[in-house]
Image (cartoon, rainbow, N blue to C red):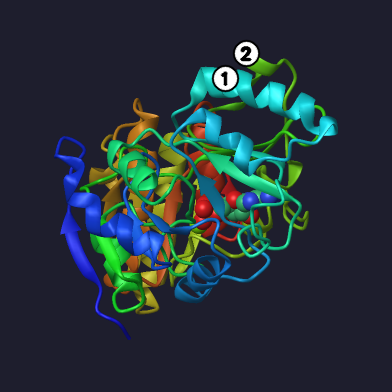
Amino acid sequence: MMETKVITCMETDDMDCLAEAGEILKKGGLVAFPTETVYGLGGDAMNPSSSRKIYAAKGRPADNPLIVHICRWEDIYQVVSGNISCRQALVNAKKLADAFWPGPLTMILPKSPTIPYETTGGLDTVAVRFPSHKTALALIDRAGGFVAAPSANTSGKPSPTLAKHVLEDMNGRIDMVIDGGAVGIGLESTIVDLTVEPPEILRPGFVTCKMLEEVLGSVETDAAILEDAKGLAPKAPGMKYRHYAPKGELTIVSGNRDKVISYINSKIKEEKLQGRKTGVIGTVESVGKYCADVIKSAGSREDELSAAKRLYGILREFDEENVEVMYSEAFAESGIGQAVMNRLLKAAGHHVVKL
Ligand code: AMP
Ligand code: MG
């Protein structure tokens, strides 16, 4: 165990507070930091030993690659292969960067030889992102420009949306946590694979398929990540693991609103008779109608972003309160709602009741 130092740095603060954090990364240490999506667990992407430490701290399987974070477009040329056969992928990358970077979009491209295999989980492709969070950008710059960072949770747990969540999982395992308050989006970045034609979405996020298609023309979505995909192997190595999972049993119930509420309440009554502690994820419009022990609101139905922002925190709260059986309403599959449903389906092990 090491001592984990916690500092506070909000986006509006003077970024000089990051001097020590930058030094830690340059020397091969690990620093967790806020981004606009979730908290990341950063190490120097060019240092194989830093990447190995990230896997160890998270208990992450070694074949699950890390995302390389940059803070300037030009730096992509040091991350991505300059090979002539990669030119089309880079043309598409530039178009997407002009539209969505800095921001919550990760692109898969052929890797340059300078990126260690420890960072890419042994793959010849690399995931790159240019985030928009000011603290993240200043930290990447101070670290030398290339920070490998997966989400700062223990492998299998929900991604952290608060510094408190990072400490729950990483205290004593990493050198520093930068507390920048609550993150903006609350779900991980969209991942798009540009090494295939047409480009393919490997993980849905804030940047939707429709937004990508407006820039690139046709874009596909990995069939394994959609609803009803039980059994298919996802193409992003990290998407195949049981992830975002609460300790209890979660079921998603979809269909007519009133029927969903009465179905969930009837199940809750049965579970309570068995002596089990119950939980529900509803919305501000419905939470007053449930009879569970622990009832959480994912925000308003009208506002899909609020569910994105609340979901992981709610799953952690259920664990803290030792909830054994949980039911969640389904969310709209449009816009970021698709990303919310993707994470919820994984948390529920694809257990869905359709009324
Ligand atoms: P995290 O940063 O924890 O959200 O995890 C990174 C995600 O990116 C995981 O799901 C990885 O499998 C995925 N990823 C990273 N690099 C690649 C790559 N080269 N090809 C496909 N997926 C990748
Ligand atoms: Mg993760």
Q: Outermost residue, right direction?
A: 85
Comparing 309 with 42, the one in front is: 42
Q: Quadrant of residue 275?
A: bottom left
Question: Would you say the residues marked 2 and 1 are in contact, meaning their CB atoms lie under 8 Å apart?
Answer: yes
Judge left or right: residue 150 versus residue 311: right
**Quadrant housing the N terminus:** bottom left
Residue on which the image places disc 2 = 214
Residue at x 53% of width, y 27% of height: 334
Location of residue 138 (image quadrant): top left
Position above or below: 192 against 2 = above
Residue 80 rendering spot, x and y as whole percentages:
67, 40
Helix or strand or loop: what does disc 1 sit on?
A: helix
Residue positioned 21% across, 38% down in the render: 11
Q: Is residue 325 left or right of residue 78?
A: left
Reading the image, the residue beneath label 1 is: 211
Q: Residues within 10 Å of mark 2 (few under 14, many from 20)?
A: few
